[in-house]
Image (cartoon, rainbow, N blue to C red):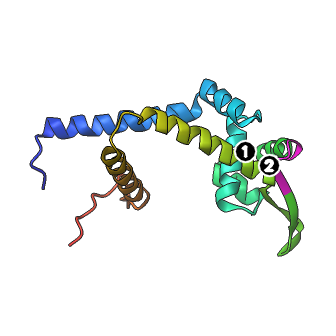
Amino acid sequence: MSDLDPSDREQQLLTIHQFVELVVASSRSPRQRERMARAAGVPVTEAGSSLLRSVSRHGPITLGNLASRVGLDQSTVSRQVQALETSGLLERSADPGDRRSSLISLSADGRRFLERVREVARHDYDAALADWTDHDRATFATMLDRFRHALVGAEVDDQGWSKPRLPAR
């Protein structure tokens, strides 16, 4: 049970929502994407970046599974994968489980590109937190990680609403 006034609680939730919206908007911003691609040294579209991150997390992966993971049709993903292959960021290999199929994975250049994008992002965070104490930075990182785990582990009811998590005993 919370001792917090309901209006304070609502304001806290609004602040969290605004932060998450900022993160999402930043990741979808054409200007931000262009800046990240310029810093990484490779022009990649938003869709291309999304595919690279998905292949990084789940690869090697078939084209059909990749399309399913990113929520696009296979022909669209196929064209995007082809462009990323031409750029040298992805590569295909034979699927040992099904010779008619191929597996898509990051190339060495693709791994370097994603690492460079992460490096640019970490630099942005470091600059934004430059005047924070080490303790505040550590607390913020701990709380964000706790929040991330809670969101990922949330259960949903039949109507699509997250169920409240009960405190551990």
Instruction: Say few, some or many: other residues with alpha carbon within 10 Å of mark 2 (under 14 / 14 to 19 / 20 or more).
Output: some
Above or below, 98 against 127 in this view is: below
**Is residue 76 visible to the viewer in this orientation of the structure?**
yes
In-image side of 12 versus 30 (left or right): left
Foreground pick, 3 / 39: 39
Q: Which residues are magenta?
A: 85-91
Residue where numbered disc 2 is placed: 109
Mark 2: which secondary structure? helix
Above or below, 7 against 138 in this view is: above
Assess whether residue 90 is covered by the magenta stretch: yes
Foreground pick, 98 / 141: 141
Is there CB contact under 8 Å for labels 1 and 2?
yes
Foreground pick, 107 / 163: 107
**Is residue 73 visible to the viewer in this orientation of the structure?**
no
In-image side of 87 versus 157 (left or right): right
> What kind of residue is marked 1?
Phe
Which image quarter: residue 107?
Answer: bottom right
Assess whether residue 167 is covered by the magenta stretch: no
Residue where numbered disc 1 is placed: 113
Q: CA distance from mark 1 to mark 2?
A: 6 Å
Q: Residue at x 58, y 32 (%)?
A: 28
Q: Residue at x 39, y 35 (%)?
A: 19
> What kind of residue is marked 2?
Asp
In-image side of 20 versus 107 (left or right): left
Q: Position of residue 158 (x, y in %)?
A: 38, 58
Q: Residue at x 36, y 54 (%)?
A: 142
Mark 1: which secondary structure? helix
